[in-house]
Amino acid sequence: MQSETTRVEAFSDGMFAIAITLLILEIKVPPPGPEHLAIALLRQWPSYLAFLMSFIYIGVMWINHHRMFTHIRKSNDVLLVLNLLLLLGVSVVPFPTAILAQYLGGPEQRTAAVFYNATFVVIAIFFNLLWRYAVARQLLDKSVNAAYAESITRQYAVGPIVYLLCFGLAWINVRASITLNAALAVFFALPASLVRRRQIPPNQPIT
């Protein structure tokens, strides 16, 4: 039987694909000039770094969105609105990425990093709101037990906290903030813990 969320997932996948594709458009071809092309390409390292970071972030968001909707099998108007808010955040990512690429390494890099991190704080909040609403309204598949749903809730709750830490750290040390962001992206890309699976009794319905 087809899930009620099939169209939501299809539309969301399209938005993720568009956002991740737009990132590469911010990397420009160096214009002809007196310096060697290799040097001109190397000068664009902030663009490469910003592109790679945002590509990973959007990819991780897509992975987790996919994981989330393997558990969500029902939808309603509120869920659709919350999903649209999440996609609004995703669609904005290319803009702060371009800002970071333009100003990283310069005197305004702190402002650029703060703006970049603020975007992901908001996205993480929307992600949590979407999942928590689905759990609260019992929109999950019946095979998902309460303990497993709670473990996912706790994992997602880390996102806004750590992204907020990255946001604050950007005011003090831009390099440390970017490093922490990269570590967070790797963390959320990890598969579900085998230990967590063993601890949760199967087929315990959500109440």
Image: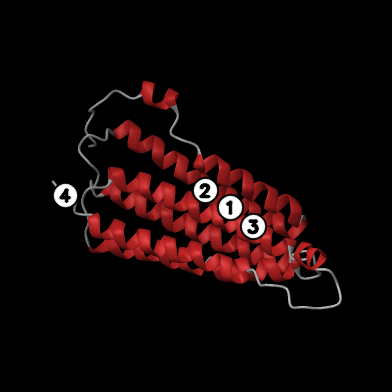
Q: Are marks 1 and 3 in contact (CB under 8 Å)?
A: yes
Name the mark on residue 163: 1
**Under tag 1, what secondary structure?**
helix
Residue 82 visible, this angle: no
Query: What residue is pinned by disc 2?
Result: 159
Horizontally, is 21 left or right of 2 in the view? right
SS class, disc 2: helix
Mark nearer the viewer, 4 or 3: 4
Give yes or no for contact between labels 2 and 3 (Cβ–Cβ under 8 Å).
Answer: no
Q: Residue at x 31, y 48 (%)?
A: 69
Neighbor class of circle 4 (other Cα within 10 Å; few <14, some 14-19, many 20+) is few
Between tags 4 and 1, which lies in front? Answer: 4
Callout 2 touching callout 1 (CB < 8 Å): yes
Q: Earlier in the sequence, mark 4 or mark 1?
A: 4
Image coords of residue 109 (percent x, y)? 75, 66
- Image side of residue 132 versus residue 26, left or right: left
Give the camera-side residue of 78 and 53: 53
Of label 2 and label 3, which has the lower sequence position? 2
Q: Residue at x 49, y 49 (%)?
A: 60
Q: Amino acid at mark 3?
A: Phe
Residue, disc 4: 2
Q: Which residue is mark 3?
A: 167
Q: What's the distance in space between the residues labelled 2 and 4, CA to CA? A: 31 Å
How far apart, in angstroms, are the residues tagged by discs 2 and 3?
A: 12 Å
Image quarter in which the C terminus is found = top left
Label 1 neighbourhood size at 10 Å, few (<14), some (14-19), many (20+)? Answer: many
Q: Position of residue 189 (x, y in %)?
A: 50, 42
